[in-house]
Image: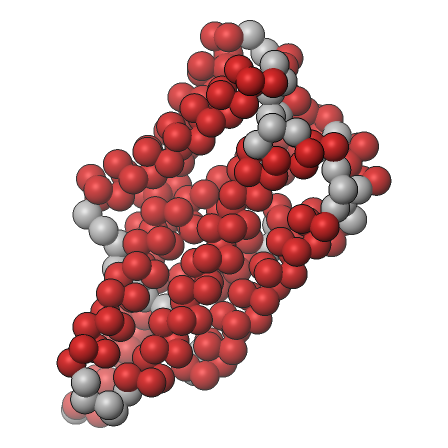
Amino acid sequence: MALVPCQVLRVAILLSYCSILCNYKAIEMPSHQTYGGSWKFLTFIDLVIQAVFFGICVLTDLSSLLTRGSGSQEQERQLKKLISLRDWMLAVLAFPVGIFVVAVFWIIYAYDREMIYPKLLDNFIPGWLNHGMHTTVLPFILIEMRTSHHAYPSRSSGLAAICTFSVGYILWVCWVHHVTGMWVYPFLEHIGPGARILFFGSTTILMNFLYLLGEVLNSYIWDTQRSMDEEKEKPKLE
């Protein structure tokens, strides 16, 4: 894919996330009025993560265009910082959290939708918005991974960061329950304390696995691309 189409695509994805967030926040749902508001839902947090990530991608593209040919070392330094931030955010948050939300939501939904997305919500959230929150995240992040190479941080620091996020969110969910007496997700009401601990531990392990999956997928995509480019160059060299 050419450079300019990639830049346009990122702008389109960013605008779509802004639209989804605006439409979601405009919905008058009882759960939005209770303690924690929308911020107690991982889906909403993920939407914010994706919007911020693609915002950084667009900002990086603009900075790259402005820096090209300028010869300014300061601008080059700032661009490198932006690229580092973009790559870190994809590796640690955008990919693992985004894929986690899509996978876990649809697995539980297929088993029993009342456990995670009660039918009552259909009266508030239209189908297209549900897919915008729980489906399109997957193709959008895969497109970004395919169109731009991202340098992953060291494995230890990356895993430490995603563990911190996971544990932080679990503690937040428990705190909301402590304050309100209600669990954020309906299925947590129907399982015992031991099962909850097992579930929370499993989700943290899954987040770590998804981080590693992103690292492997990124390497595979760009190692394959590099091999293809080298194959194309061989006839020219001969």
Q: Is residue 227 visible?
A: no
Residue at 35%, 43% in the rendered image? 211
Q: How many marks?
A: 0
Is residue 31 or residue 219 the one in the foreground? 31
Q: Image height check: is 49 above or below 37?
A: below
Image quadrant in which you'd find residue 213: top left
Q: Image height check: is 23 above or below 231?
A: above
Q: Quadrant of the N terminus?
A: bottom left
How has the structure been colored for display?
A: secondary structure
Question: Relative to residue 177, is residue 145 drawn left or right?
Answer: left
Residue at 62%, 53% in the rendered image? 21
* Image location (x, y in percent) of residue 45: 52, 43
Image quadrant in which you'd find residue 221: bottom left
Question: Relative to residue 34, is residue 2 drawn left or right?
Answer: left
* Image location (x, y in percent) of residue 80: 23, 69
Residue reaching furthest right?
123
Question: Relative to residue 103, is residue 53 drawn left or right?
Answer: left
Q: Image height check: is 146 above or below 157?
A: below
Q: Quadrant of the C terminus?
A: bottom left
* Image location (x, y in percent) of residue 170: 45, 26
